[in-house]
Amino acid sequence: MRNHLHLNPLHGNLCMAMGLLLLSVGASAQTQSAPAAPIVEWAPTEFPISYWCGPPLKGGFVTPERFEEIKEAGMTYIVPEGENRPTVADNLALLDTAHKVGMKAFIQDVRLPHSLSEPDAQQRIHAVIKDYAKHPALLGYFLKDEPPTSKFKGFGEVVAFMRQHDPGHPIFINLLPNYATPKQLEAANYEEYVTRFLDEVRPFVLCYDHYHFAMDKTTGQARDGVHFFPNLAIARRLAKARGIPFFQITLVTQHFSFRDLTEGEIRFEAMQTLAYGGKGLLWFTYWHPKSQSIQWSHAMINRDGTRNPHYYMVQRVNRELQALGKELLPAESLSVFHAGAASIAATQKVPGGVAPRAADEMVNVVGPGEVSVGTFKRGQNEHLALVANVDYKKPLQTRVFVASGAKRPHRFNLTTRTWENAKALAQIGGYAVDVELTPGGAALLKW
């Protein structure tokens, strides 16, 4: 297994990033078989996009100009930087700066306990709420990154208490990926780990990180992980069963055995998350992390504050992600399937992969190529399908059949952000639609 692991001090707690929607919900800290109804603590109107590791507190980087740069990159909210323990003054300065550029932020405060059994836990929580809750730029609080199951009961207590006393500001907790070891998870398998988190913590959002692209240490050749699609599938299934959204944190910055990514690979990460019904995405990392023991390179922003080429790559992908995500944000994910022998096989290499295409699916891939297809329903009578290219190196021209009856499919134009008639040929029961995909890219259809 790859030990990317956020077992490093940087990725973990400090980059609270997920702020992202991370709303947390909670009913009880006790494990229950029947999930409680989720409480909506954050109902975003734009697709949530953020990052781990923001501009450092030290060095004069927490400025309106720097936060505008984050906004220009396509991020929709601010997160803590992760290198230093912020003081109350640091957090208020971050919130003030976010407010100046019209954004909101998650903040990290070391006073937040991990259990109500800790000394003065309730008093500490009340102090945190008093310091920040009335600030107009506060989105929520970051509690912990990649915890084991032994932490869940205490987290559930804190989440429930915070929800009671500051219900408008969710708590974010981010989980390990499915290639973490049972020892790291403190669970027999990944499904048990995620299930216990959902039942004991009652989060509003399920979020995890997953880094897919690496270099083989022996040959030096690029390789892809086998766990990416099964991780998406498990998160989608368990979150959907509880009526909550899920988000994924994906790779940008080269570190450990993870490689320097191309724009096609970055786009692949985003579009596959959308195809599986993800409702938010974070990038690891925005700023070049500081570490003596880990070699980092190709973050979006270099250590000296200059822009790396990855800034512009992610910016371009975020424009597409924002446009497609806004259309899919209010839609219900109905199904996911893969087409193409290699793509189908990739979903089944480890437990948890998606099921084969059902015979009664409204969409079928009748052309060449390796793609994933996510189907969605929006409102009472509108259906959508996102066709995502699994090949991040080459563009693809393929064809899908949409069983829309006499209803002609439309395709979403990423440039104009409008719907237009798709290139379609009427057939019995629906239309054959020609689809052109960029490397790692996606096309959105509706009928």
Image (cartoon, rainbow, N blue to C red):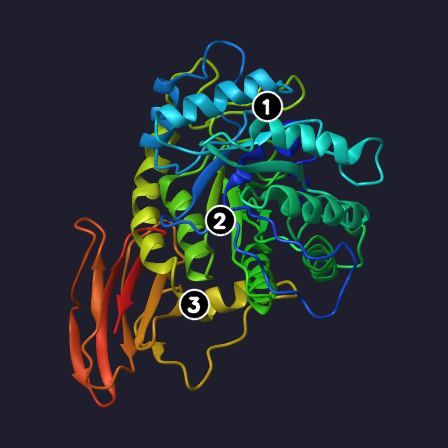
> Residue 42 got which mark?
2
Residue 139 percent location from the top left of the image: 50, 38
| Residue that badge 3 annotates | 332
Estimate the spatial distance between the alpha carbons at disc 1 and disc 3, rounded to whole Å.
Answer: 41 Å
Q: Is residue 153 above or below residue 195?
A: above
**Helix or strand or loop: what does disc 3 sit on?**
strand
Residue at point 17% right, 74% down? 424
> Residue 295 got which mark?
1
Q: Are marks 1 and 2 in contact (CB under 8 Å)?
A: no
User: Which amino acid does the dot numbered 3 rest on?
Assistant: Glu
The reply, left or right, for residue 348 in relation to residue 268 is: right
| Circle 2 Cα neighbour tier, 10 Å, few/some/many (<14 / 14–19 / ≥20) | some
User: Which amino acid does the dot numbered 2 rest on?
Assistant: Trp
- Seen from the viewer's position, the closer of residues 334 and 203 is 203
Residue 5 visible in rendering: no
First in residue order: circle 1 vs circle 2: 2
**Helix or strand or loop: what does disc 1 sit on?**
loop
Residue 209 visible in rendering: yes
